[in-house]
Amino acid sequence: MMQSPPLMNIQPILLHASSPPMLNKLKALAESVPSGAFVEVGVHNGNTAVGLYEVAIAQGRELYLYDTFSGMPYSGWDDHHQIGEMSDCSVQTVITRMPKAHVIEGVFPASAVPMPPIAFVHADADQYESTAGICRHFPPLMVPGGQILFDDYRCLRGCIRAVDEYFPGRVVLDDGRALVTFG
């Protein structure tokens, strides 16, 4: 069994998924996948979703954005965030920023709507239970060559545990995020 990498000690600006180097890598990965829709789970105010939105618009793809918009729905023994944290967001803000995206409010995967085949998922759910839900829900929907990028694999124990349980063959990128590609 592959061991998880140690939690990285990186300056906070580099840890944030919307920092320019992280966002550019996200966009490059999304641009390179086969035809299919994009999804982000864990949208908050849409700071990383905007990058996916730009690619989706340029390539004529659908984008599905999932969030509770009321903060963390779960908190387990290995989760960093407590229930309700990160509630400083608004579904209306995200709709205004990305009017052509499908913005879905609720706890994923219970909130999942019917979607076309999926080419790219940005998983930024921050804790074990939601990340495990992503790991269970998306594999049957992924196109061959489609990818799931797990943003929090580099820094949050709950995410590391979920990804390692479901995808022991994941690739760890040089920035610490985990990437799963479907055959």
Image (spheres, rainbow, N blue to C red):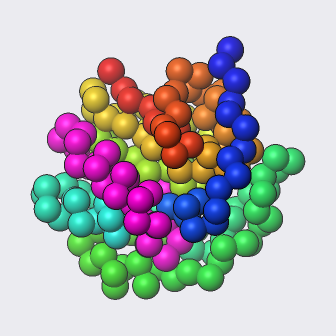
Q: Position of residue 1 (x, y in %)?
A: 68, 14
Q: Position of residue 153 (x, y in %)?
A: 61, 44
Quadrant assignment, res 88: bottom right
Q: Quadrant of the C terminus?
A: top left
Question: From what the image shows, is residue 90 above or below residue 59?
Answer: below
Q: Position of residue 3 (x, y in %)?
A: 70, 24
Q: Nearer the viewer, residue 106 or 150?
A: 150
Q: Is residue 7 left or right of residue 134?
A: right
Residue depicted at 14% across the width and 62% down the height = 58
Give the residue furthest to the top: 1
* Residue 104 visible somewhere in the drawing: no
Question: From what the image shows, is residue 131 above or below residue 141?
Answer: below
Residue depicted at 38% across the width and 29% down the height = 181
Label count reads 0
* Residue 83 visible somewhere in the drawing: yes
Residue depicted at 74% across the width and 72% down the height = 84
Q: Is residue 148 left or right of residue 163?
A: left
Q: Position of residue 130 (x, y in %)?
A: 63, 50
Question: From what the image shows, is residue 173 above or below residue 14?
Answer: above
Magenta part of the protein: which range? Answer: 19-48
Q: In the image, is residue 47 part of the stretch drawn in magenta? A: yes
Residue depicted at 59% across the width and 59% down the height = 15
Q: Is residue 148 left or right of residue 82?
A: left
